[in-house]
Image (cartoon, coloured by chain):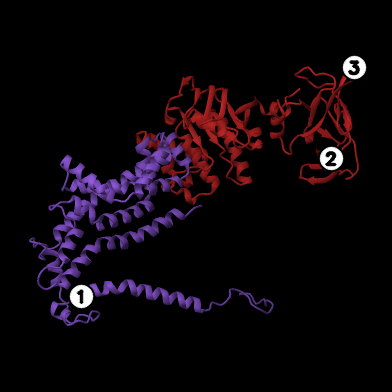
Chain colours: A red, B purple
Amino acid sequence: MSSVSLRNLKISFGAVNVLETLNLEVAEGEFIVLLGPSGCGKSTLLNAIAGLLDLTEGQVFIGGRNVTWAEPSERGIGMVFQSYALYPRLTVEGNLSFGLKMSGMPKAEIARRVADAARILQIEPLMKRQPAQLSGGQRQRVAIGRALVRNASVLLFDEPLSNLDAKLRTELRVEIKRLHKALGSTMIFVTHDQVEALTLADRIAVMHKGVIRQLASPKEIYQRPVDRFVASFVGSPQMNFLSGRIVRRDEALAFRLDGGGEIGLNGYDFTHPVSDGQVATLGIRPEQAQLQPSPQHTESLEPTFTIDEPMGPDTLLWGTLGGETFSLRTTSDHTPNLGTAMPIYVNPAQVSLFDAAGERL
Amino acid sequence: MTTHHTSEGPSGPAPRRIGPARLGIYAFLLISALFFLLPLYVMLVTSVKPMAEIREGGLFALPSAVTFEPWIRAWSSACTGLDCRGISPGFWISVKILIPSVIASILIGAITGYALSFWRARGANLLFAALLLGAFLPYQVFIYPLVRIYSATGLFSTIYALVLTHVIFGLPVMTLLFRNYYAGIPIDLFKAARVDGGKFFSIFFRLMLPMSIPMLVVAVILQVTGIWNDFIMGLTFGGLANRPMTVQLTNLVAPTEGEIAYNVNMAATIMTAAVPLIIYFISGRWFVRGIAAGAVKG
């Protein structure tokens, strides 16, 4: 178990800055997910931690040791790749023992470690097979095993589930979480899939254009996104954004939609001072609005829904509110009338407000 | 078996017909095969005919009395100039040139290609461009400067000069071949090997080289053929002591006084051509196997 610490990390390829002065502290045994769209620098960051990429500036510490100039194999890391990257001409056993053999470890110790990893990942029946004879899920297990045999205190995952089909992805996701609980090693996991991020992470670092926009627990990221990018990237279907203004109404603040309608903001936890008439965006997640009022869901708006999508456990309603797209998730079996305006209710303490620049208010 | 009747009309695969297009293709293939096989046939039958029979004409006729005497003479006692030891000394010199040249050029080319595709040293692209340029420059340009360099360093007319020349001239193409092959291997594989503790040479020899068998076979075919068939380098740098087989063959078949021993010439020519041919036959099978093995993906 080692902590990972990135200090003033900067990586540029020629004139292009892929990572801008980035700082990140990962605690021992923590599960960190680097989440972001493609090209945000998350894989670059992982490669930099692994030592597979030269830094332009800054330092990398693993377990308190400065490993900025250390070889990948000297950093105490194991790495799992999206493409599995299994050695094609070796058996599963050969793949697991390849690195240990190269380091000249005694055979008995290699056999013990390989057997341990095979048992943990339940790949014992596959040991004599070639990678080409394995399914995608089995290959990725072997790839994880190859990282495990190194007894690495930090495991790095580069989109390991992206090449798997939906069912396997869910299975292996749970497996990885179980593995983290069992081993307690520090894990850094790169993905563009927000479900993986929300389900696996102790903390998520949402990245965009080479910068960490928000580093917080999944709950915090989901409920209190720091800006519009984080708010729109996390959550599916994405948060509804409604443009309007902050207004003062009866000594209290309210939000007046440009397209008509108004909600009181009593209970909203402002992080910045606001002024009367300030341009802002109201963000409501589809499940933060409901069809019936409740003691908390006091404020109402009137969208018109035109389409319903039954998803099984719940139903998504799609429509418009003041000319902007609006979606709502309801668990109610009762489908409302489509095509006519109807009231929905929100809790002001749950919604998000962003200023004109997209920062949370 | 199902007894269910489908509706009338065409059903299942369409019947195959041999149309005029297909007949044309077969005719073309047959004629091409004959065209390329005919000279070989003439060489073979002539090489086992006694001179008396050759003098009668009948180029395409089968030999009435088969004799292997021309083959024995060509190998061990035919005269090239004053030297009457046949073509065998040239064969062994060619082998001595071939083996180190092929191994060294392929190995160095593969390592250079590997370094260029995976390690991305500073200026790697520039180096690669220079190598490519080298592949397209005509050899003749280098010959005189090389003669001067070899004579200044005392390498001239030694086997080393020939091996060195073949390795250097083989490098651009070998590097290009392997660089492009390695460019097709996912970079993640290389990264995984580095995390696993691989160094420059251990990754190459333990991971990349075993994966390169199809390319190695191609490289061996190219290099063996090229180096064995080389004439100008052998003639220029070999001197009198190290004439490869090709140079000796020309001396042997060059018209001298007296009767031209067509059967001996044919036998010597077939022997000289045999090595690349054998390589084609042996490695062709491996080549196909290598490609097939690489093509199996999950």
- Relative placement, left or right, of A108 versus B224 is right
Q: What residue type is labelled 2?
A: Thr
Cα distance between the residues tagged 2 and 1: 93 Å
Callout 3: residue from which chain? Answer: A
Q: Do the residues labelled 2 and 1 touch (CB within 8 Å)?
A: no
Q: Looking at the image, do the residues carrying marks 3 and 1 touch, with CB atoms under 8 Å apart?
A: no
In three-dimensional space, the C-alpha distance between marks 3 and 1, rounded to whole angstroms, equals 116 Å
Label 2 in the same subunit as label 3: yes
Q: In which quarter of the image is residue A354?
A: top right
- Identify the subunit bearing mark 1: B
Q: What element carries label 1?
A: helix
Q: Would you name the residue on which mark 1 appears? A: B46
Q: Which marked residue is nearer to the observer: mark 2 or mark 1?
A: 1
Q: Earlier in the sequence, mark 2 or mark 3?
A: 3
Local SS, label 2: strand
Circle 2 residue: A320
The residue at the point 50 percent across, 43 percent down is A123
